Amino acid sequence: MIQNLRGQPHVNNLVHTATGVYRIARDSVKLDPWGTTDIADYSRLFKEFGIEPIDELVNRLPEKHRYFRRKIIFGHRDFQRIVEAIEKKEPYAVMSGLKPSNVYHFGNKMTADEIVFLQKLGGEAFVCIADLEAYADNGIPLHESEKIAIDNVADMLALGLDPKRAYIYRQSREQRVMNLAFIFSRGVTKATLEAIYGERPIGLYMSALVQAGDILLPQLEDFDGPKPVVVPVGADQDPHIRLTRDLARKFSKDYGFIPPSATYHKIIRSLTGSKKMSKREPWGMLTTNDTPDEAAAKFMDAFTGGRETAKLQKELGGEPEKCVVYEYYVYHLVEDDDKLREIYSKCISGEMLCGECKAMGVEYLTKFLEDHQRKKRALWDKAIEIVTSSPRR
Ligand code: SF4
């Protein structure tokens, strides 16, 4: 059944609850791939959108990235297909897009980390440079987005993406994606797109169909035909996944498409503590291009779970669950689980105060940025070659 942005049957905003009572869905979670999404309780996505908890499948993975170990990736659709392919050493693909509208930030890094991880487990990677979406959503002309794309691709290579086992292409140059989008336009009506995305400019509806083409591209005969494909996304991107899975089923008779799988990660907050990093709030956005000094200044100013005074914090301890600094430790900065437990325990016991804790975070951050930017410089020419060359097949 088609569901709207809130994941509910689109019938007068009425919802069937577990108790059988219908109520108005005004407090439902809103997932908006082009806007700001506020999810206070991720478990609601299981009930309201049909996303499945991922816990049991994680145990079957031969290795567990920290995003899986720490439940940052919390949910999935049909990820068991990928786990089975890994277990049986059968072909599968991991697919994602990067929208070249801005420098890479630590939210973008999460998707890249997941692609790299699933590629290392044996998947072929497909990365779409979504230049058409950058135009439709942000008005960035293609010649501008090309420069941003080179920077973004250099980031992905520096994070470990192996270009030899990846198909990286520009959306505007991949005719097969355009063809699929056109074909898919026969399978949806404007009312359907409105039900999923709300009322949006036609360009965004078109880019949603183009993205469906991107996600299903790896299953064309040119790429060895139907296979399990997983799309790692932030929870706010679920409307695209639902649309594409519907289209895959509608066109499976012609193409043999297997509905794509997806994994869902939590959305890292802005350093200011607001819901999501945004260009409108540059002070809250750590980017991979920040100099260590710029990053340190932002990090030292970040929202924490500290108490009003040092005395109170020593007495009561800090509140890491509310703390953006701790979120950065969990998501990005500390790989060692024991070290993370130590930070948590020193925080809640009041043994460590926020100034000291942030200063330690700056050391991790500086090391990451220096390493990453060195690798990025070394891979810059490769990124230019990838972005400026035509599709390879
Ligand atoms: Fe956050 Fe660290 Fe302060 Fe605890 S001590 S609230 S983890 S900054």
Image: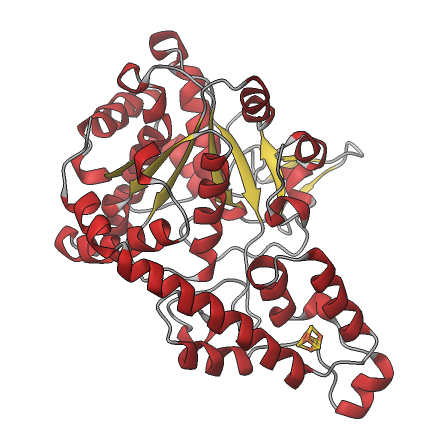
Judged left or right of residue 378, residue 21 is right
Q: How many marks?
A: 0
Q: What percent of the width, then of the height, locates residue 216?
A: 36, 25
Its colouring scheme is secondary structure
- Viewer can see residue 208: no
Q: To which quarter of the image does residue 87 belong?
A: top right
Which residue occupies 80% across, 81% down? 351
Relative to 347, 193 lies left or right = left
Is residue 270 placed above or below 151 in the rendered structure? Answer: below
Outermost residue on the right side: it is 315
Quarter of the image where one finds residue 104: bottom left
What residue is rendered at 54% in x and 20% in y?
A: 85
- The percent coordinates of residue 132 (x first, y second) are 23, 44
**Position of 238 relative to 305 (above/below):** above
Would you say 68 lies left or right of 281 here?
right
Q: Position of residue 71 (x, y in %)?
A: 67, 47
Toward the viewer: 75 or 326? 326
From the viewer's side, name the closer residue of 380 and 9.
380
Residue 316: quadrant of the picture: bottom right
| Residue sitting at x 36%, y 42% | 97
Q: Is residue 190 visible?
A: yes
Residue at x 13% of width, y 54% of height? 143
The reply, left or right, for residue 274 in relation to residue 157 is right
Locate the C terminus by quadrant: top left
- Percent position of residue 90, x then y: 49, 17
Image quadrant containing the N terminus:
top right
Q: Quadrant of ligand 1?
A: bottom right
The image shows residue 82, relative to residue 127, as above or below, that is above
